[in-house]
Image (spheres, rainbow, N blue to C red):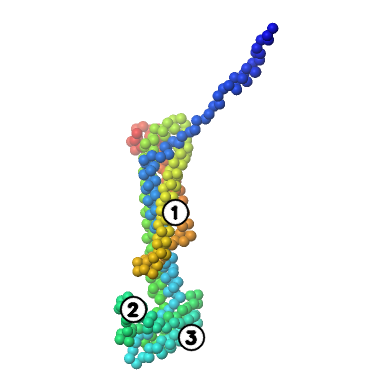
Amino acid sequence: MTEPPSRNPEKASAKTQQKRPELRVRPTAPILPPSNIQGSALMVVISIMAFLACLTLGGVSMVRSTAASWESQISREITIQIKPDDNLDMEKALTQARDLALTFVGTKSGQIVDEAATARLLEPWLGPGLDLKDLPVPRLVIITIDENNPPDFDSMRALLKESIPQATLDDHRTWVDRLVSMAHTTVMIGTGILLLVFTAMVLTVVFATRGALSGNRHVVEVLHFVGAESSFVATEFQKHFLKISLKGSAIGSALAALFFATAGFWQSRTLATPETDQATALFGTFSVGVLGYAGIFATMIVIALLTTFTARLTVMRTIYEIDTLRSDPTRTDGIGS
């Protein structure tokens, strides 16, 4: 006789559990879509603002370094100018002025600017082939000084005036003061432009966040209805705008860094040309250096964080207004449906 099938409930339950399909958790989707027209437009705006901010930062850095270079070069030298006179032996007077200046503590060396060098200095205005004997052109003596221990300019000026009445001493302090004032003014202007760019970006993010909330108001209200906390909704919006701001600021900062790198490469390839010489004289070298690129990267991070923080504050305030309107439907100063 055949045995009846086993009716052990434990074995039957084990077989049933083995045949059941495994449950798979459906991946959750973000509250806001990853990409939409509003997000793309905001990313373009942030890219433009990041580019302008980094361009301003690099420009201010270039002007400051150029002004510092001018100040350093000027503060290392003083100039003695001797005007021609009928009863004056110019070459002897130049040598005497140089020797008198070098007797002071704080002077390093002296150089007499010869006639050929003087003619080259005047060539852009008076043309080539200039004969200095036909013109009453002053002659110069350049004295190199110790920046950390400069000489007594007043005593040197008085001694030169007593020994050579036609000689005048220029210690360039007026030019140094003007350069310092120009550098400070440029920094203030650049800082003002950066503040304007950041302010415009904050306002743009505020309106963009409000627009995103207005378009997804039903999502926010459903989340509130099922018990989602305000911090959760704000965090989701914050993540969304952080991704947008990081992409936009990275694109703008990369374009600014590429601009400076391209300008520096072009400048190095076109040396000794009138256009490059004029640009170098006005703006210095188009190279922001390691610190400049670090500043561009820091500006990118600041823009991204500022955008994210602004979006979070805007979301929290908007949710507060929604809660206030739900608690008191008679109010009309909340967000409209």
Name the residue located 40 percent from the left edge and 79 percent from the top edge: 170
Residue that carries the numbered disc 1 in the rendered image: 299
Q: At 40% across and 67% down in the image, what residue appears?
A: 271
Is residue 305 rendered to the left or right of residue 329?
right
Hey, which residue is sitting farthest bottom in the picture? 87
Q: Is residue 199 above or below residue 314?
A: below
Query: In percent of the image, x 44 and y 82: which residue is there?
Result: 111
Question: Does residue 63 appear anywhere in the picture?
Answer: no
Kindly identify which residue carries mark 2: 122
How far apart marks 3 and 2 lie (CA) works out to 31 Å
Disc ID at residue 103:
3
**How far is disc 1 from disc 2 in space, using C-alphas?**
45 Å
Look at the picture and state if 134 lies above or below 194. Answer: below
In the picture, residue 88 is in which quadrant? bottom left
Q: CA distance from mark 1 to mark 3?
A: 52 Å
- Quadrant that contains the C terminus: top left
Name the residue: 46% across, 79% down: 144
**Residue situated in front as seen by the camera: 29 or 274:** 274
Answer few, some or many: residues within 10 Å of disc 1's Cα (few below 14, many 20 plus, some between 14 and 19).
Answer: many
| Of labels 1 and 2, the one closer to you | 2
> If you read the primary sequence from the N terminus, does the residue marked by circle 3 or circle 2 appear first?
3
